[in-house]
Image (cartoon, rainbow, N blue to C red):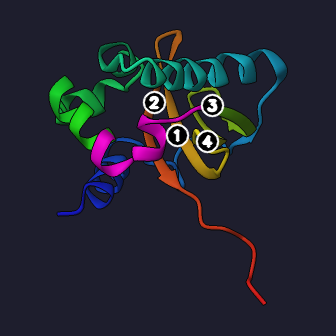
């Protein structure tokens, strides 16, 4: 099974958003900072090649499916843009207090950008990453 597809299956199993709980709304400044901090810290860990530190930001449900070694292999093979990112910039961020979604633009060393959507869940007082999906470009070539 393709690693990205497997990641989406795992995401669907551990982070159901549709129809459950309070509706997502644009995050307030303090919450937005806390959510985005988790994403930017994980991206920094990937840049440093520190998969153990990056794994620490993963949701416990994800850790039930992926060991550290499996996580590293999945990220390197399925998300090379994230594994080898030069930088990342967080954008729109929504949450309902327990779950969050944040759009992230990832830049490679050549300055090329790809957009991803991160999903997170609150684990006690800490936000944890539950999944990542590549967003399709909204432009049309003419």
Residue at the disc numbered 1: 119
Mark positioned earlier in the residue sequence (3 or 1)? 3
Q: Position of residue 63 (x, y in %)?
A: 24, 27
Camera-nearest residue between 88 and 126: 88
Q: Position of residue 94 (x, y in %)?
A: 71, 38
Callout 2 environment at 10 Å: few (<14), some (14 to 19), or many (20+)?
many
CB under 8 Å between discs 4 and 3: yes
Report the residue at 22% width, 38% height from top: 73
Residue at the disc numbered 3: 87
**Where residue 75 is drawn, which disc sits there?**
none
CB under 8 Å between discs 3 and 2: no
Q: Secondary structure at mark 1?
A: strand
Report the residue at 74% width, 82% height from top: 140
Report the residue at 55% width, 17% height from top: 41
Camera-nearest residue between 135 and 85: 85
Q: Quadrant of the N terminus?
A: bottom left
CB under 8 Å between discs 4 and 2: no
On whether residue 135 falls in the magenta region, the answer is: no
Q: Which residues are magenta?
A: 76-87
**Where residue 129 is drawn, which disc sits there?**
2
In the image, taking residue 136 as reference, residue 9 lies left or right, namely left
Instruction: Name which quarter of the figure residue 9 lies in.
Output: bottom left
Mark positioned earlier in the residue sequence (4 or 2)? 4
Give the CA separation, mark 4 to mark 2.
Answer: 16 Å
Give the CA separation, mark 4 to mark 3.
Answer: 6 Å
Mark positioned earlier in the residue sequence (3 or 2)? 3
Residue at the disc numbered 4: 106
In the image, taking residue 126 as reference, residue 69 lies left or right, namely left
């Amino acid at each position: 099974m393709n690693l990205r597809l497997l990641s989406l299956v795992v995401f669907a199993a551990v982070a159901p958003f549709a129809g459950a709980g309070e509706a997502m709304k644009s995050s307030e400044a303090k919450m937005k900072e806390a959510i985005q901090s988790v994403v930017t810290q994980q991206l920094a860990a990937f840049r440093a090649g520190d998969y153990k530190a990056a794994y620490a930001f993963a949701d416990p449900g994800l850790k039930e499916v992926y060991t550290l070694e499996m996580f590293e292999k999945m990220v390197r093979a399925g998300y090379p843009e994230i594994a080898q990112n030069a930088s990342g910039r967080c954008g729109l961020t929504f949450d309902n207090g327990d779950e969050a979604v944040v759009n992230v633009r990832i830049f490679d060393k050549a300055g090329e950008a790809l957009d991803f959507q991160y999903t997170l869940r609150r684990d006690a007082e800490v936000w944890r990453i539950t999944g990542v999906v590549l967003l399709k470009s909204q432009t049309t070539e003419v």
